[in-house]
Image: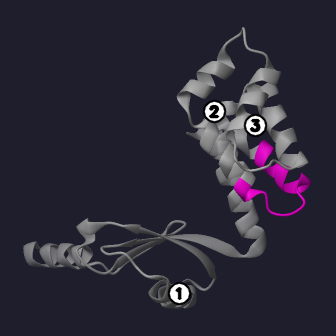
Amino acid sequence: MAELATIARPYAEALFKAARGDLSAEVAALADVAKHEQLRQFADNPKVSRDQVYAVIADVVKTPLSPAAQNLLHAIIDNGRLAALPEIAAQYHALVNAQSGVSDAKVYSAFAIDAAKLAEVVAALEKRFGRKLNATVEVDPELIGGIRVVVGDEVLDTSVKARLQQMKVALTA
């Protein structure tokens, strides 16, 4: 949704400038809480004060909040932008990654990958993509075998499913 991205950008940039250190964990925790529809309905209730909304969110978040994260939460609640918090978290995380020269990589595998094998895979992927990667693994049995890696808008698909699809296209052409 382009509108949420537009709303979220100034908040993410302001937090990035004001933060001393990486607040990704705190912002992600706030975003996880803000995703709940019941909380947003509670926050939109005109009978509920902004302080009550802040207190509920602060109690639910398990991560202690830094002053910068507290200020962000107050600003978001005061301006009625709680629905934009997940997008703010995503944009803030992207800013932190851009500053540190790191990219997030999503590795889809047909089977679970142990830590040692994942380290080897990440090292090879870092050479392939030419940058440091934060990899997360998701098991997708539909791949049959191999892996599929998504880094930003780049995709590297070495799965059996992709190879079978390529063979199907070649045979039907």
Q: Is residue 5 visible?
A: no
Secondary structure beneath label 2: helix
Q: Position of residue 100 (x, y in %)?
A: 76, 74
Q: Tag 3: residue type?
A: Ala
Position of 49 with respect to 113 (left or right) is right
Q: Is residue 108 magenta?
A: no
* Labels 2 and 1 touching (C-beta < 8 A): no
**Nearest to the observer: residue 23 or residue 16:** 23
Q: Is residue 115 depicted above or below 48 in this figure? A: below
Q: Position of residue 60 (x, y in %)?
A: 68, 37
Q: Estimate how packed mark 3 is, as few (under 14), some (14 to 19) or many (20 or more) residues with alpha carbons within 10 Å.
A: some
Residue that label 2 marks: 83
Residue that label 1 marks: 119
Q: Is residue 113 depicted above or below 54 in this figure? A: below
Position of 139 with respect to 36 (left or right) is left
Q: Estimate how packed mark 2 is, as few (under 14), some (14 to 19) or many (20 or more) residues with alpha carbons within 10 Å.
A: some
Residue that label 3 marks: 58
Q: Tag 2: residue type?
A: Ala
Label 3 or label 1, whichever comes before in sequence order: 3
Q: Which residues are magenta?
A: 10-25
Per the model, the C-alpha gap separating discs 3 and 2 is: 16 Å
Instruction: Tally the marks.
Output: 3
Q: Is residue 119 depicted above or below 104 in this figure? A: below
Q: How is the image coloured?
A: one colour
Secondary structure beneath label 1: helix
The N terminus: image quadrant: top right
Per the model, the C-alpha gap separating discs 3 and 1 is: 36 Å
